[in-house]
Image (cartoon, coloured by chain):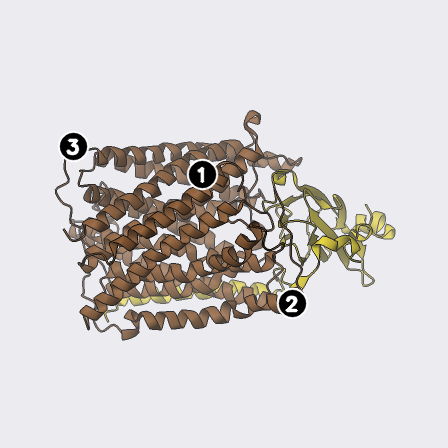
Amino acid sequence: MHIDPLEKKWLYVALGMVVLFLGSIFLSLALGIKPPSNVETIDSARLHLSEEFAEDNLGVHIQPDGSIKVIMVAGRYGFFPRHITIPADTPITFRWASIDVLHGVHMPMTNMSTMVVPGYVSEVTTTFPKPGDYPMLCNEYCGLGHDYMWSKVTVVAKQTWEREHASKGGES
Amino acid sequence: MNDHQSRRLALWNWTVAFAAFLFASFLGFYQVVERSGLFDFLESPKGYFASVSTHGVLMAYVLTTFFIMGFGYLTATTSLKRPLWQPGLAWAGFFVSLIGTVLAAIPLLTGKASVLYTFYPPIQAHALFYIGAALLVVGSWVWCAIMVVMAVQWHRDNPGRTLPLAMYATVANALLWLWTSAGVALEVVFQLIPWALGWNDTLDPGLARTLFAWTLHPIVYFWLIPAYIALYCFVPREAGGYLFSEEMAKFAFLGLLIFSLPIGFHHLYVDPEQGAGWKLWHGVGTFLVAVPTLVTGFTVLASMEIAGRLNGGKGLFGWIGTLPWRNPMVLAAILALLMLILGGFGGIVNASYALNTMIHNTAWVPGHFHLIFAGTTVILYFAIAYHLWPKITGRKLVSNTLALIQLWTWFVGMTLLSTPWHVLGLLGQPRRISGVTYNSLLTLAWQPYELFMIMGGAVLLGSAVLFGVILWRTWKNPEPETDTGIAYAEPIHPPEGLPAWVENIKTWNLVILVLMLISFGWPIAQFFFLKTYESLPWGY
C-alpha cells in the first residue's frame, strides 16, 4: 500500500467535511427539526367516513392548549379547504390525507413540505415567521391537471389573528 | 483480433444508446419551451407529460444501460486481454433489452404511459410499459453475469494478481447494478405488472415507494461509474501522465459499491410511510458515500497535475495551462469535475435532513441531477465515445475541433439550464409542472429564469445534434483509424500489498447483504405488520 502524505491529509479533510455535514443533521435534530415520519395508516377510499378527515372537520382547529391543528385533504386538483387563514409565530400542526393518488404539498419559501401518500397520514409541525399570502402548490405529478393543483394560505400577524379569528374558532 | 465480438457489441449497444439520447434531446428542448409558460399556443399538459416521461426513460434508463453494456464489453476484453465469455449470450441480452425498450416506447409515445420515469403508483400506465422496463433490466442482468464470470475466471487463471483497475470498476458496477435493480424489479414484478394486468385490484403505494427508493439512489452510481473509469483510466494517460494511485482508486470504487446501496431513503425524507430513525440512518450513509467521490476528485486532479508538470507547467497553477486542453478526454474531464463540484454541493443540500424541506420536489432537484448526470456523467460518455468510437468502427474521428466545440457547448448549455433551475427551486417552483398557471405574485419572480432555461435548452439541443453528426460522419469516414488498441493509464506505483478482501467478490456481497438487511429489512417488513390500506389504479 502506498499512501502519499498529501493523500493522507486530503483524506482527513474529506472526513472532516463529512463530519461537518453530519453535524448539521444532528444539530437540526437537536433543534427539533424532524421530517414528517409518523407512519400512520388510513383508508384513503373511505376518508369521508373517517372522523378526522370528514368534510365538515377539515380546516383550522384551535386546540384546548392554544396550539393550532390544520386538517386538510389533498385530491385532484386542490388542497381542501381551498383557502385557510393561520397565525404567524405559532406552532401549527398540519395533518394530511390523500383521497386519490400521490401528491406533494409545499408552501414556497417555507419548510411546510410533505408528500401525501394514499393510505397514509402525513403530519408536519412548523411555524411561519412572516405574515402574507402564500400559495400552496402540489409538487408531485398527480395527473394531467397537476399544474392547476394549488390552494391559498393567508398567514396573519399573531395580534390580528387573536383579534379577528381566534374567537371564531379559526374559520376564515 | 480476439475482441472483435466485443467491438461489434459496443458499436450496436452504443448506437441504440446514442439514438435514444438524440431523440430525447429534441424532447428536452420542446419541454423547456413548453413549461416556461411564455408561449400560450404550445400549452399542452398531455403533450408535455408524455414527452417528459419519454425523455426521462430514454436518458436515464436507455442511454445509460446500453452505453454501460457496450463500454463494459470493451473494458472486459481489452483490460483482461481475453476473449469475451459467451458472446451469444451478450447478444441475447442486447436484444432482450432492445425489445424491452421498444415495448415500453409504444405506450410512452402514444400517451398511454405518461407516468414519468419514476412511475409512482397508484397512477397506472399501460401494462406494456412495465413489461418493457422489466425486460430492459433483465437484458442488462445478462451483461452483469458476463462481467462477473469474466472477472472470476481471470482471478482463477491469474492467482495472486489483482484485477486491472478498469475491470475492477466494471465488475463492481455490475454487482452494484444487480443489487440496485433488485428493488425496482421487486416493485415491478410483484406489484405493478400484476396490478396493471388486472390480476390484483390494489397495491400499497407506501411499499412501492420504499422499493423504488432502494433503487433510486445507487442507480446514479451505476450511471456514474463509467465516467469515473474514464477519469481514472483514460484521463491521466491522455493528459500525458500517470494515475496518482491505483490503490485509492480501488478503495473508491469499493466504497461506491458498498455505501451507495443502503441510503435511498434520502428521497423519502418527507414521506409519511417511513420512520424518522430510518431516514436518519440513510442520511448518515448518504454523507459517507461522499468520501469516495472526494477521494476521486483528489486522485484525478493529482494525476492531471503530474501530467501538467511533465508537460512543463511550473508554479502553483502553471500545470493547468500546460494540460492538453485540445484533447477531448482531458477537456471533458475538466468540465465534468467543475460540474461535479457544483452539483455535489447542491446534493449536500438535498441530503440534509432539514434543508431538504425547502427544495424537496422543486425545480432545484432536476437542476441538481441535470448538473451531475447530464453534466458530469454524460459529458464523459461523450469523451469516451470520441476516444473509442474510432477504435470500434475503425474510422478516424472526423474532426477534433468539432468534438471540442461540442463539449464546450454542452458545458455552457448545461450551466444555462441548471443554474436557473436551482434558483427557481429556491423560489418554490415545483419540478414537475407543464406550465405556470398559479395565480400568485410569486410567479413573476420566475420569468427571467425561464428565459435562461430556454436558452440553455437550445444550446444543449445544438450540442446534442453536433454529437450525433460527429459520430455519424466518423462512422462513414473513408479515412481509417490506425490506432485501434485501447490503452489504460499506468499508475505511478504498481498496486501491491492490498488486503485480500479488496479483490474478493464474495466478501463484498456479504457486507452489502448485511448492510441492506439492516437498512431495508424492517422498513420493508413493516408493511406486512401494519394495518395498511391499498390503492385502486387511477388514470391521469
Instruction: Kindly check if marks 2 and 1 are in contact, taking CB atoms under 8 A apart as contact.
Output: no
Which residue sits at x=43%, y=60%? B180
Identified by mark 1, the residue type is Leu
Chain identifier, brown in the render: B
Q: Which amino acid does label 3 sit on?
A: Pro
Q: What label does residue B530 carry, if any?
A: 2
Find the distance from the CA under tag 3 to the CA under tag 2: 67 Å
Which label lies toward us, 3 or 1?
A: 3
Q: Which chain carries label 1?
A: B
B477, above or below A26, in the image: above
Q: Are tags 3 and 1 found on a single chain? A: yes
Horizontal relation, residue B176 to residue B88: left or right: right
* CA gap, disc 3 and disc 1: 37 Å
Q: Mark 1 points at which residue?
A: B417
Q: Quadrant of the C terminus of chain B?
A: top right
| Residue B12: numbered disc | none
Where's residue A147, x and y in %?
A: 61, 38
Q: Which sits in the foreground, B342 or B36?
A: B36
Residue lying farthest top? B41
Q: Quick one: label 2 or label 1, which is nearer the N terminus?
A: 1
Relative to B207, is B461 on the left or the right? left
Q: Residues within 10 Å of mark 2 (few under 14, many from 20)?
A: few
Q: What residue appears at the point 36 percent right and 62 percent down from the top-left corner?
A: B175
